[in-house]
Image (cartoon, helix red, strand yellow):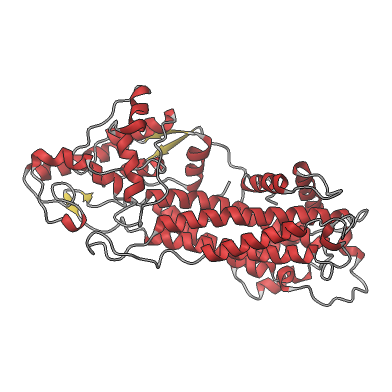
Amino acid sequence: MVNSHSGALALVPMAETVTLDGRSLSIDDVIAVARRNVSVTLDPKALKAVASSRNVVEAAVARGQTIYGVNTGFGKLAHVRIPPEQARPLQLNLDAVRAMMLLRANVLMRGTSGVRPVLPELLSEMLNRGIHPRVPSQGSVGASGDLAPLSHLALAMIGEGEDGRTLTAQGLKPVTLEAKEGLAFVNGTQAQTGLAALLVSDAWMLWHAAHAAAAMSLEAVRGTPDPFDARIHDARPHPWQQRSAALLRDLLADSEIRESHRENDPRVQDAYSLRCTPQVLGAVGEGLAFAERLVTTELNAATDNPLVFGDDVISGGNFHGQPIALALDVIAISLTTLAGLAERRLERVVNPDLSSGLPAFLARDPGLESGFMTAQIAAAALVADCRVLATPASVQSIPTEGNQEDIVPMGMTAAWKAQRILGNAERVIAIELLAGAQGLEYLKPLRPAKAVARLYAAVRQDSAALASDRPLTADIETVAAHIRVGRFAP
């Protein structure tokens, strides 16, 4: 589990419930509800604020005040006034989302959206009963909210479509959306932010596993841990570089393999992919910490439009997803860097000209067998895919809504790209872990560092040593899956 703003892995007791108040939701909470089906409750005090904001909207409508999205059209059609008797049909013409139900419910609990308490109450009930509307993965440009994906949530809540029938079959009563409420659902960044929260958590798991793979590779090629000396990194005090070096020092402590080549080793320095691991993974950590900060803030941010403050209803632009789109692009670039570094270390383990005595491609009978040759090719292909996908989406604006929405962040595009990069990078690290473990087979009876030995044992739970050529697809997928749940976190 990832503690917010720390990137540190900790054993966090699983909460029995997550209470939404619009201000204290964490990435841990998102993971608990999204992946562990922890139940959701609503803070009673926050619910009172929700009801109060709704009263402000209804009073404004009653006195004839013109408010965007309440009694006007949307986007380029904001100048079109909607008569009171047509307010309900207007809301039904908006679609809405499910994938990020928790975030949408939490935002509504801030009391700035002008909706009735029944809406977050229904959302929490849907979450607790496992009613999950299907959401399209494409169609959002990330501003004016994640309009297309978020719409599918409202469809279920108003009882429309197959998901709406599921709602009623579960004994829940569909709502009739009143003025402002449809807009409150689709004006928001919850689709891209929900994906970003999951990505931040998974990326930190991968960051730690990358250190495990790096340590195992260093041992396999009999490299030196001297470049991880604290004095070197204190002289360039980037915090995550320092943490990375400290993690590697802990992983590589008390190694018989290291002692076996401490004296009379003709090599002066290891290659960058080994020697500069803290500098590179430290920079990756800085990128992930930056993204985590933006995402954590957004979890509890009011992102619809207009917003209710006291007796005022004010139009603005908090629905614009640029902070999250940028965070997602940084995650994508960071994980592409991590994967590229891992592939270069992998090359040094399998290449007989670089691996300091290991057999070619780690095969038992090189030539007759190919060992990890194809696995390294697969890693190279995955890295190439990451590099193509790492092109930032957040600068790819295409104006919409008759040029009213003339600068948009493409946050959902950034999210789906980052998610694919994460999967690629997990598999690259999985291949490196498998290759590193195979390399250690050839150094026996020398024992690696105690921490590396534990990691080796974890790999062997998933994959037996390569005695002869066999398909490695299942091994790679199993190790990659276990990276995500923290098995290879030092």
Q: Residue furthest left?
A: 63
- The picture quadrant where one finds residue 95 is top left
Residue 202 image point, x, y percent: 57, 50
* Residue 310, above or below 33: below
Residue 66 image point, x, y percent: 10, 51
Q: Is residue 129 left or right of residue 422?
A: left
Residue 7 image point, x, y percent: 57, 55
Q: Residue furthest front?
A: 368
Q: Nearer the viewer, residue 137 or 69?
A: 137
Q: Is residue 315 left or right of residue 16?
A: left
Q: Nearer the viewer, residue 70 or 58?
A: 70
The residue drawn where x is 39% and y is 44% is 103
Residue 347 image point, x, y percent: 75, 65
Can I make out residue 236 in this image? yes
The residue drawn where x is 82% and y is 52% is 450
Q: Nearer the viewer, residue 223 or 405?
A: 405
The residue drawn where x is 72% and y is 46% is 475
Q: Is residue 134 left or right of residue 71?
A: right
Q: How many marks?
A: 0
Q: Is residue 403 left or right of residue 438?
A: left
Can I make out residue 6 in this image? no
